[in-house]
């Protein structure tokens, strides 16, 4: 049976995770769908100040920035839903672009190559401009559904952080995530703007999801197929995805044989 990252030993037989109410339960629906104004308020920001966006987090409306809401006076940018951090976040993840290798063992995580491009923007009444000096943390499970550094697992594979450049950009090289029981295929991320002394002044945490057709194509290949060729929880049945996950669905391009590159939405 597939492995379960909730258990200390990833090689142990799979058991269904305990569904007890717990704010650290990755299966517990905690996130909320935030309006643009509420998201600005959550970050301690107001009109003319800054907000955050990356990949599917902040995107232009289909009509473009010129069709801003007259009622709100804000540009045509939509802050997408915050979602639960889950139980597997580790503070002070290694600063690096390529997160595939476990720096404690030197082992490279096997899987379909995946490139994540984040674009972080400053949101003001006049429009969206690049936002540098934002710390981005990314973490997810490996092809067999296991996370590093938690629940008795060691190492730091598939974990990393970067600070956005002056153009608000950061690129991560990783592998396509696997799956584990009770959750749709996903990647966690956290955004924290830094002040001049390097201190975080806000936080936005959410998750990225993938089209089912891409999941199927990837999981039919090794090493994913050894774990199971189909995730037990599709997007439509995932309690967290149903809380706005369709707005965080990556538009992946490429193919499993050569690697996949989700198309991030620039703000």
Image (cartoon, grey):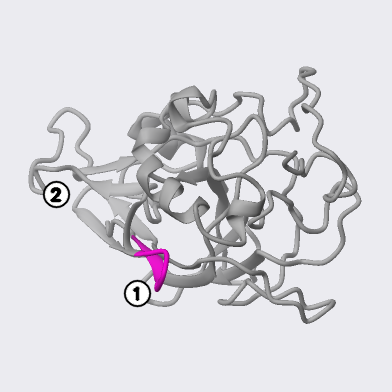
Q: Which residue is mark 1?
A: 167
Q: Is residue 234 above or below residue 53?
A: above
Q: Which residue is mark 2?
A: 65
Is 137 situated left or right of 37 in this image? right
Which residue is situated farthest in the bottom direction here?
106
The magenta segment is 255-262
Mark nearer the N terminus (2 vs 1): 2
**Label 1 secondary element:** loop
Is 60 situated left or right of 132 in this image? left
The secondary structure that most of the magenta stretch takes on is strand
**Residue 113's x, y, as percent?**
49, 70
- State the residue at coordinates (23%, 41%): 74
Q: CA distance from mark 2 to mark 1?
A: 18 Å
**Residue 34's x, y, as percent?**
42, 29
**Label 2 secondary element:** loop
The quarter holding residue 154 reads bottom right
The quarter holding residue 80 reads top left
- State the residue at coordinates (43%, 25%): 236
Front in this rendered view, residue 266 or 88: 88
């Amino acid at each position: 049976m597939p492995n379960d990252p909730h258990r200390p030993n990833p090689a142990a037989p799979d058991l269904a995770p305990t569904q007890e109410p717990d704010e650290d339960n990755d299966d517990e629906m905690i996130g909320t769908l935030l309006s643009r104004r509420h998201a600005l308020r959550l970050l301690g920001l107001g009109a003319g100040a800054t907000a955050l966006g990356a990949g599917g987090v902040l995107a232009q409306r289909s009509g473009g920035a010129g069709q801003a809401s007259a009622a709100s006076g804000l540009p045509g940018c939509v802050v997408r839903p915050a979602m639960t951090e889950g139980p597997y976040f580790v503070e002070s993840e290694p600063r690096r672009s390529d997160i595939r290798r476990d720096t404690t063992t030197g082992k490279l995580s096997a899987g379909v190559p995946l490139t994540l491009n984040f674009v972080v923007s400053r949101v003001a009444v006049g429009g969206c401009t690049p936002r540098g000096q934002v710390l981005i943390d990314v973490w997810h499970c490996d092809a067999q559904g296991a996370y590093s550094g938690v629940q008795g697992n060691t190492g730091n594979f598939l974990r990393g952080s970067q600070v956005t450049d002056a153009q608000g950009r950061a690129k991560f090289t990783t592998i396509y995530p696997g799956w584990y029981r009770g959750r749709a295929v996903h990647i966690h991320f956290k955004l924290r703007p830094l002040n001049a002394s390097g201190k975080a002044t806000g936080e936005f945490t959410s998750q990225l999801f993938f089209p089912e057709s891409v999941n199927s194509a990837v999981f039919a290949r090794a090493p994913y197929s050894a774990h199971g060729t189909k995730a037990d929880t599709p997007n439509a049945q995932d309690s967290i995805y149903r809380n706005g996950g369709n707005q965080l669905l990556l538009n992946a391009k490429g193919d499993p044989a050569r690697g996949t590159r989700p198309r991030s939405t620039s703000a």
